[in-house]
Image: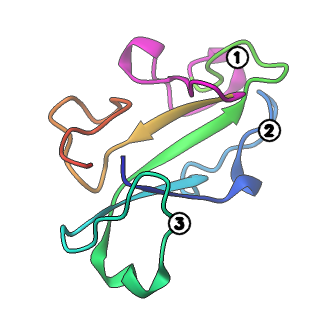
């Protein structure tokens, strides 16, 4: 689902790690349709002009953290989203993530884990 550009230095390590909501660790881009790489293809920077920002994604390692640190009222976060509304584990990884579709509308909801308008 789109290209995920990751800045791993911005991942929240645990509930005490400061999270700046203005600096999401993952930016999700989609293609304009004239650039159609396969799911495992590495991005070719020569096609940057064919990419558009679709949304952002926040993530944290679940190491030492039971679930969603953003909905934990004691963690002091300003973003509170339940698992039912989009926050959840990334299958096959030690991370939990939340997509926020603020740049490309999502008929399934702004926090839905996938966006049917993006391949």
Q: How is the image coloured?
A: rainbow
Q: Position of residue 42 (x, y in %)?
A: 53, 66
Crowdedness near tag 1: few (<14), some (14–19) or many (≥20) residues, C-alpha within 10 Å: few
Cα gap from disc 3 to disc 1, whole angstroms: 40 Å
Name which quarter of the figure residue 71 lies in.
top right
Q: Earlier in the sequence, mark 2 or mark 1?
A: 2
Residue that label 1 marks: 74
Q: Position of residue 60 (x, y in %)?
A: 68, 34
Residue stretch in magenta: 71-94
Side of 6 where 103 appears, left or right: left
Q: Position of residue 12 (x, y in %)?
A: 73, 40
Residue that label 2 marks: 17
Residue depth check, mark 3 versus mark 1: number of the one nearer the observer: 3
* Relative height, residue 110 to residue 82 (above, below): below
Cα gap from disc 2 to disc 3, whole angstroms: 31 Å
Residue that label 3 marks: 42
Cα gap from disc 2 to disc 1, whole angstroms: 13 Å
Task: Confirm or deny contact between disc 3 and disc 1 (CB under 8 A).
Answer: no
Q: Earlier in the sequence, mark 3 or mark 1?
A: 3
Q: Residue at x 47, y 15 (%)?
A: 83
Q: Position of residue 69 (x, y in %)?
A: 66, 23
User: What secondary structure is the magenta-colored segment mainly?
Assistant: loop
Q: Earlier in the sequence, mark 2 or mark 3?
A: 2
Q: Is residue 89 magenta?
A: yes
Helix, strand or loop at disc 1? Answer: helix
* Relative height, residue 50 to residue 1 (above, below): below
């Amino acid at each position: 689902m789109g290209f995920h550009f990751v800045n791993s230095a911005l991942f929240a390590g645990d509930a005490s790690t400061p999270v700046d909501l203005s600096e999401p660790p993952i930016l999700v881009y989609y293609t304009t349709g004239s650039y159609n790489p396969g799911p495992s293809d590495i991005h070719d920077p020569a096609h940057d002009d064919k990419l558009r920002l679709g949304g952002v994604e926040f993530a944290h390692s679940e190491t030492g953290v039971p679930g969603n640190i953003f909905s934990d009222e004691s963690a002091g976060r300003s973003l509170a989203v339940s698992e039912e509304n989009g926050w959840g584990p990334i299958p096959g990884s030690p991370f939990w993530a939340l997509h926020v579709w603020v740049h490309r509308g999502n008929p399934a909801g702004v926090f839905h884990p996938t966006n049917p308008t993006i391949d």
